[in-house]
Amino acid sequence: MWFVDFEPVPGREQGKDRPALVVSSRFHLDITLGELVSVLPLTSVERRGWVITEQIRTVCADRFGRCALEISLSKDEIKDVGHVLAQMLIVSDICFD
């Protein structure tokens, strides 16, 4: 979990400097040379933050601030995020035939 500067943002996207869960795979980080990172913003720190799975963002690594050591997800929460992402993204080899 890292703090990421999401400004400027258009429309209804989450903005401000806020915590985000990194969801880039090692493969993605390798092909972007670590310069682009896919993240999911959290709602806020004041209340127990919720991962906003419908707002996947790929941002420049320069937008990263400090590591958010005070925020963590349980194994079940991480599993839930993965389940939602799997439903949102087409990852089947069938699509590439």
Image: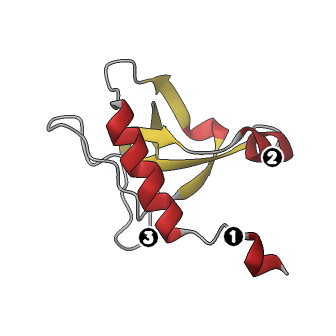
Q: CA distance from mark 1 to mark 2?
A: 22 Å
Quick one: quadrant of the N terminus? top left
Residue 53 or residue 6, whichever sits in front: 53
Residue 11 visible, this orientation: yes
Looking at the image, the residue that sits furthest to the front is 94
Is residue 32 rendered to the left or right of residue 53? right
Residue type at the position of mark 2: Thr
Lateral position of residue 7 relative to residue 12, left or right: right
Query: Which residue position holds label 2?
Result: 32
The nearer-to-camera label among 1 and 3 is 1
Q: Position of residue 82 (x, y in %)?
A: 47, 50
| Lower sequence index among marks 1 and 2 | 2
Most extreme residue toward the left, as rendered? Answer: 47
> In the image, what residue type sits under mark 1?
Ser
> Would residue 20 appear left or right of 95 to someone viewing this image?
left
> Could you say where residue 81 lies in the image, as x and y percent from the top left?
41, 50
Which quarter of the picture shows residue 46?
Answer: top left
Disc 1/disc 3 C-alpha distance (Å): 31 Å
Residue that carries the numbered disc 1 in the rendered image: 92
Q: Residue 10: which disc?
A: 3
Q: Nearer the viewer, residue 69 or 78?
A: 78
| Secondary structure type for disc 3 | loop
- Relative image position of residue 33 (x, y in whole percent): 83, 39
Q: Quadrant of the C terminus?
A: bottom right
Q: Earlier in the sequence, mark 1 or mark 3?
A: 3
- Tell me which numbered mark, 2 or 3, is placed earlier along the sequence: 3
